[in-house]
Image (cartoon, rainbow, N blue to C red):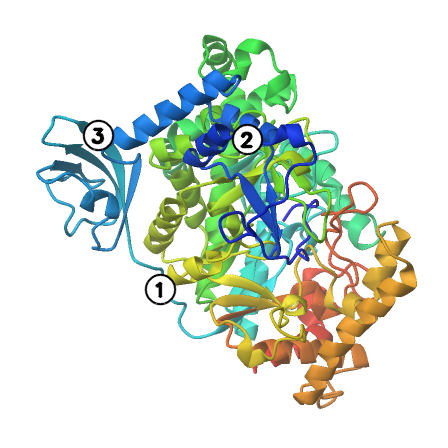
């Protein structure tokens, strides 16, 4: 997730009737919502309370409700306006025949259709172009439904027909988890790229029997000086970032006429690579992109052959207006900066005459950015193809970030779908009393439903084109998101609900069409019933060893047989300390050195040591701490890391993942929540126990990594 949200926040919570009879009020008594305002909010899916813990319920303030409703275009400026809006909403809901989107799971009749008046006539135009008069035996897809009641009322709706659930992955597989930028080979241009990903997948599949490789989001970043390195705050989730291209693998690169410039660029790439691998410097994404951009400008001067030209034209037609909008934003950002809200007023609207005129004037740059999207899409597809050819049953697991940057391409091109003046975050809880603001504008649930979830559908379809599986970051966002009004503290927000049934139906539909697995990142605060609903639809969860305890009992580590089966089980994630750092307590020392501890160092050390000790005691009791294990281990630390992964194999988890840096004793987390410029988040190469950068070639030859992977193969 983002640098602002810690995966260690484990409190269960939800708003709703389960809370105590006397919920806590907002800090200011005069900010209590009126009964009418509360009813109006509930009718628009805006929560009037939330539960930061199982024994507490907090009432949302009138300010939070008013601002959330305003973002949904509901006027609550006066008591009279509230009353009028409430009456209008009640009348609208009472009179409508159908909601904007109706879900049909398999062949089951949707409740919305069963509730129609007797004698209602249905007309269905299917996605495949057929006309039907009943909802029986409809093919999967998003169809157009029109209902005409006997009294003359009519309604049109989107009818989503999805399989009842995704099929369970066959057998059990293990795989590698890695942040792609951190995986440098001797051919990288200063950061890991899609060529490295294909190489890693081929080696892991053919030589090690791995079933998947999971990477960070590869979405297009917001350019800047410097560029925000976090992959979880992208400019666009729909289109990938060309910084991940392996330039030498672009066919036209070999035919660039200016060979002297090519030689100079390759030397420059070598210096960027050596700076990280030999001199211990941080990954410099901006310098890497500048070198690749210059190379790709040369590549574009090489004419495409007839076959390549036809493939590019097909890509343009397939992606349509969405690609043109994305490329237009990129071209305009080159002139006016990367925050569209600061552009000349006429250009802030993607449909304005000024934007149309600018697009025409910048058509050469627009085509350049379209070409980059095509090239990147092709290399992403090639990586998945290599993974499957290497025998991987899943292949590449891609990551879908929870949102986008407010100044980026998606927020500009899809303005009507985003809630103006709002940001996604998290409420206060036992682990963060101030709450969190992630700086990501939320989608409007009403506009999504009215469109039949079109932007969401197109996003998923694009990602599944080259993914064997998709990890959904903060999968709870399919159900509700904490909306924080801009200019207000996260404590002044409230939850806004989405139609989870429709969001899940679209997800299951698109994943099933692609034959892909879906993994939900369900760490942190999870509303009761969410995990059960996801499991019922075939969406796997995420289980991290250190968090799997008997929270309803004595709090002891959860024995392996008590773990859930429908999950990806791991020892750590990109937001958490590597396993070696946790076992040695070095993660506590790191946080202390950065001034992040809220309690005395010795107290934090003692608690961390006790936590680790309980797990090591369980591993020993289960006979998993096997010392040198036939001479493969060279230290007690390696034996303990191997034991941790033997434990994961004892669980029924369908997928088991190893954090690739764990295989060489890396101590440094890729991201340290709660830091910004105090720590080099998202800029570290994979390193060994001494902090020396390790290349892909060295990883493949590492006896320590191979010994750990042999544990997983067993």
The spot of residue 453 in percent (x, y) is 37, 37
The spot of residue 302 in percent (x, y) is 51, 31
| Helix, strand or loop for disc 3 | strand
Seen at 27% across and 45% down, the residue is 141
| Helix, strand or loop for disc 1 | loop
The spot of residue 571 in percent (x, y) is 65, 68
Mark 2 residue crowding within 10 angstroms, few (<14) / some (14–19) / many (20+): many
- The quadrant holding residue 621 is bottom right
For discs 1 and 2, the disc positioned in front in the rendered view:
2
Does 231 appear above or below 212? above
- The quadrant holding residue 710 is bottom right
- The quadrant holding residue 223 is top right
Q: Which of 368 and 644 is in front in this view?
A: 644
Q: Determine whether, in the image, residue 69 is placed left or right of residue 435.
A: left
Q: In which quarter of the image is the C terminus?
A: bottom right
Q: Nearer the viewer, residue 643 or 504?
A: 504
Of the image marks 1 and 3, the number of the one nearer the N terminus: 3
Question: Alpha-carbon distance for marks 1 and 2?
Answer: 40 Å
Residue labelled with disc 2: 65
Residue labelled with disc 3: 155
Work out which residue is located at the far front of the displayed protein and give it. Answer: 22
Of the image marks 3 and 2, the number of the one nearer the N terminus: 2
Instruction: Find residue 167 and name its label.
Output: 1
Question: Alpha-carbon distance for marks 1 and 3?
Answer: 34 Å
């Amino acid at each position: 997730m983002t640098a602002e949200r810690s995966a260690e926040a484990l409190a269960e919570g939800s708003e709703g009737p389960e809370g105590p009879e006397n919920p806590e009020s907002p800090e200011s008594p005069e900010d209590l919502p009126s009964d009418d305002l509360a009813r109006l909010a509930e009718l628009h899916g805006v929560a009037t309370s939330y539960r930061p813990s199982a024994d507490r319920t907090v009432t949302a303030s009138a300010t939070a409700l008013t601002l959330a409703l305003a973002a949904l275009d509901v006027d609550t400026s006066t008591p009279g306006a509230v009353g009028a809006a409430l009456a209008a909403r009640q009348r609208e809901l009472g009179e409508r025949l159908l909601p904007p989107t109706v879900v049909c799971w398999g062949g089951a009749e949707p409740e919305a259709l069963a509730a129609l008046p007797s004698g209602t006539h249905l007309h269905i135009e299917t996605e495949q172009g057929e006309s039907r008069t009943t909802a029986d035996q409809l093919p999967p897809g998003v169809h157009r439904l029109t209902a005409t009641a006997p009294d003359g009322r009519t309604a049109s709706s989107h009818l989503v027909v999805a399989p009842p659930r995704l099929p369970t992955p066959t057998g059990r597989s293990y795989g590698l988890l890695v942040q792609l930028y951190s995986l440098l080979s001797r051919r990288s241009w200063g950061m890991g790229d899609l060529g490295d990903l294909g190489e890693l997948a081929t080696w892991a599949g053919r030589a090690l029997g791995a079933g998947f490789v999971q990477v960070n989001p590869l979405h297009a970043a917001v350019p800047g000086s410097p560029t925000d390195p976090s992959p979880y705050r992208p400019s666009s989730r729909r289109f990938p970032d060309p910084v991940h291209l392996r330039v030498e693998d672009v066919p036209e690169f070999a035919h660039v006429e200016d060979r002297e410039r090519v030689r100079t660029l390759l030397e420059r790439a070598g210096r960027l690579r050596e700076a990280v691998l030999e001199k211990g410097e941080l990954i410099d994404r901006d310098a890497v992109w500048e070198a690749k951009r210059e190379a790709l400008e040369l590549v574009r001067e090489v004419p495409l052959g007839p076959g390549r030209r036809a493939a590019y034209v097909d890509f343009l037609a397939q992606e349509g207006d969405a690609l043109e909008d994305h490329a237009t934003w990129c071209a305009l950002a080159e002139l006016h900066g990367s925050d569209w809200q600061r552009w000349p007023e006429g250009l802030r609207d993607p449909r304005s005459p000024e934007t149309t005129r600018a697009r025409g004037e910048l058509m050469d740059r627009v085509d350049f950015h379209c070409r980059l999207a095509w090239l990147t899409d092709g290399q992403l597809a090639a990586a998945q193809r290599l993974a499957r050819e290497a025998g991987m049953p899943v292949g590449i697991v891609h990551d879908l970030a929870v949102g986008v940057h407010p100044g980026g391409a998606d927020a500009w091109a899809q303005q009507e779908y985003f809630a103006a003046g709002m940001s996604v975050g998290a409420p206060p809880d036992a682990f963060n009393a101030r709450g969190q603001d992630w700086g990501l504008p939320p989608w409007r649930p009403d506009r999504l439903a009215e469109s039949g979830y079109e932007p969401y559908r197109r996003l998923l379809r694009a990602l599944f084109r080259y993914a064997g599986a998709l990890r959904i970051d903060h999968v709870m966002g399919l159900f509700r998101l904490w909306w924080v009004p801009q200019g207000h503290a996260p404590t002044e927000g409230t939850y806004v609900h989405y139609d989870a049934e429709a969001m899940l139906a679209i997800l299951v539909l698109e994943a099933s069409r692609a034959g892909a697995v879906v993994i939900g990142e369900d760490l942190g605060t999870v509303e009761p019933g969410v995990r059960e609903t996801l499991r019922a639809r075939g969406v796997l969860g995420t289980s991290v060893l250190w968090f799997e305890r008997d929270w309803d009992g004595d709090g002891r580590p959860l024995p392996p047989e008590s773990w859930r089966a429908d999950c990806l089980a791991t020892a750590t994630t990109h937001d958490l300390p590597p396993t070696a750092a946790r076992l040695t307590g070095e993660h506590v020392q790191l946080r202390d050195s950065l001034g992040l501890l809220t309690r005395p160092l010795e107290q934090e050390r003692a608690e961390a040591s006790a936590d680790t000790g309980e797990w090591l005691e369980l591993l020993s009791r289960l006979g998993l701490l096997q010392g040198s294990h036939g001479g493969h281990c060279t230290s007690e630390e390696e034996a303990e890391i191997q034991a941790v992964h033997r434990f994961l194999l004892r669980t029924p988890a369908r997928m088991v993942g190893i954090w690739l840096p764990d295989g060489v004793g890396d101590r440094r987390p890729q991201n340290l929540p709660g830091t910004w410029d105090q720590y080099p988040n998202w800029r570290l190469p994979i390193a060994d126990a001494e902090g020396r950068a390790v290349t892909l070639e060295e990883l493949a030859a590492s006896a320590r990594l191979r010994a750990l992977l042999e544990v997983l193969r067993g």
